[in-house]
Image (tube, helix red, strand yellow):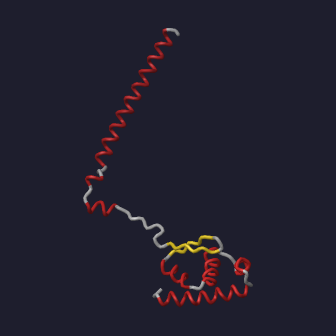
Amino acid sequence: MTSNDIRISKQFCKFCLRVLKNEATNIHRENAKQREREKSLNELTGDEIIRLSVCDKYFEDQHIFNVLDKEIVVMGNMLADAIRALPQQKRDVILLSYFVGMTDKEIGEHLGAIQQTIFKRRISSLKQLKELLEKEGF
């Protein structure tokens, strides 16, 4: 290594140190600004904590029905209670038809009934659901 190479190496090291020192200064400055803008959780009043808090309500009104080894999720307590009040065969038809999206023919094949029977069950189930929901004030 020549003396010129050593000089260039030292200059590069000094440059790198200057860049790191300036970056450290910038980080300290940013942290100080952040401390001025932010408030510690310990400093919050009870009202501020309540105002800023969030209560998750996931799965609170979800109900799971099992039909043909499928888990069908129904949202809403009133609707789930009304569906639960139906007889098993009618419940299965409603869940498969409206929540899984199967046709009457497909439902009939899985449940071992003809398409006309599934259609009648679906129509009578809808009437019964309507009555149940109207009773509840929906």
Q: Residue at x 54, y 85 (%)?
A: 85
x and y percentages locating residue 1 in the rendered image: 53, 10
x and y percentages locating residue 117 in the rendered image: 71, 87
Looking at this view, is 111 or 14 the one in front?
111
User: Can you tell which quarter of the image residue 97 is in?
Assistant: bottom right
Residue 132 horizontal side relative to residue 23, left or right = right
Q: Residue at x 64, y 88 (%)?
A: 123
Position of 132 relative to 14 (above/below): below
x and y percentages locating residue 50 in the rendered image: 31, 63
Q: Residue at x 51, y 9 (%)?
A: 2
Looking at this view, is 127 or 52 the one in front?
127
User: Can you tell which quarter of the image residue 120 is in?
Assistant: bottom right
Farthest-out residue, top: 2
Residue 122 horizontal side relative to residue 134, left or right = right
Looking at the image, how many numbered discs can be counted on the residues? Answer: 0
x and y percentages locating residue 112 in the rendered image: 73, 81
Q: Residue at x 70, y 81 (%)?
A: 104
